Image: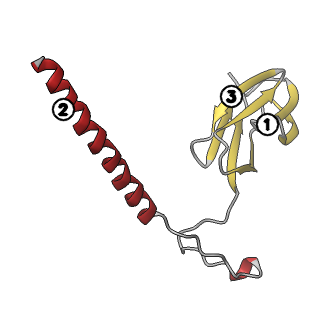
Amino acid sequence: MKNLKTIAILALVALFALPSCKKDLVNKYESAKTTPVASSAKSVKEIKAPASFSWNTTKTVGFDFKGIAGDARKSTLTLIAEDNTVLFRKLQNADENYTGTIELPTAASKVFVLYNGIKTEMPVSASNLNISLK
């Protein structure tokens, strides 16, 4: 009987305590909400952004193709984006070096290099890609 009385008291305490906690959380959430301010800018030039904000959606990445002396192969050098967009294509002798640049989306994390039928994945972690035949 004593256990039943203890359980009943705990149930009553929980019944009144839990809804009051919920009410406090709702009030805290409602007071933390902020109403967004509508922009009155009529053109892009009127938009106010922090000085550190970068408007660029692309980045320029350089690449160096290192040839192998005495290699007589000639093939198409192709750089391909993650979405299979061809970024660069050139007929390239395997024994000659070539330096160039490509424009990549800022979110790009890798580029595929296709030469002589071999496709290689290269991470875009720096501002320059080093491509060499092996």
Q: Residue at x 65, y 47 (%)?
A: 107
Task: Answer with the quarter of the image where residue 108 lies.
Answer: top right
Q: Which residue is mark 1?
A: 83
On the image, the x and y values in percent for residue 15 come to 30, 38
In terms of depth relative to the viewer, which is nearer, 16 or 18? 16
Q: Which image quadrant: the C terminus? A: top right
> Is the Cβ of the residue at disc 2 closer than 8 Å to that at disc 3?
no
Residue displayed at 42% across by 65% down: 31
**What x and y, as percent, mark residue 1?**
12, 17
Name the kind of residue labelled 2 in the image.
Ile
State the CA–CA distance, disc 2 to disc 3: 67 Å
Q: Nearer the viewer, mark 1 or mark 3?
A: 1
Q: Which mark is residue 121?
A: 3
Q: Secondary structure at mark 1?
A: loop
Looking at the image, residue 93 lies above or below residue 43: above
Q: Residues within 10 Å of mark 2 (few under 14, many from 20)?
A: few
Looking at the image, residue 118 sits to the left or right of residue 27; the answer is right
Residue pointed to by mark 2: 9
Between the residue at mark 2 and the residue at mark 1, the CA separation in whole angstroms equals 64 Å
Element type at marker 2?
Answer: helix
Q: Residue furthest left?
A: 2
43 to the left or right of 18: right
The image position of residue 113, as x and y in percent, is 75, 31
Q: Earlier in the sequence, mark 1 or mark 3?
A: 1
Indicate whether 35 appears above or below 40: above
Q: Residue at left 62%, top 40%?
A: 124
What residue type is disc 1 on? Asp
N-terminal of the two: label 2 or label 1?
Answer: 2
Under mark 3, the amino acid is Glu
Q: Quadrant of residue 30?
A: bottom left
Tell me, for residue 124, which label it has, or none. none
Please report whichever mark, 2 or 3, sits nearer to the chain's N-terminal start: 2
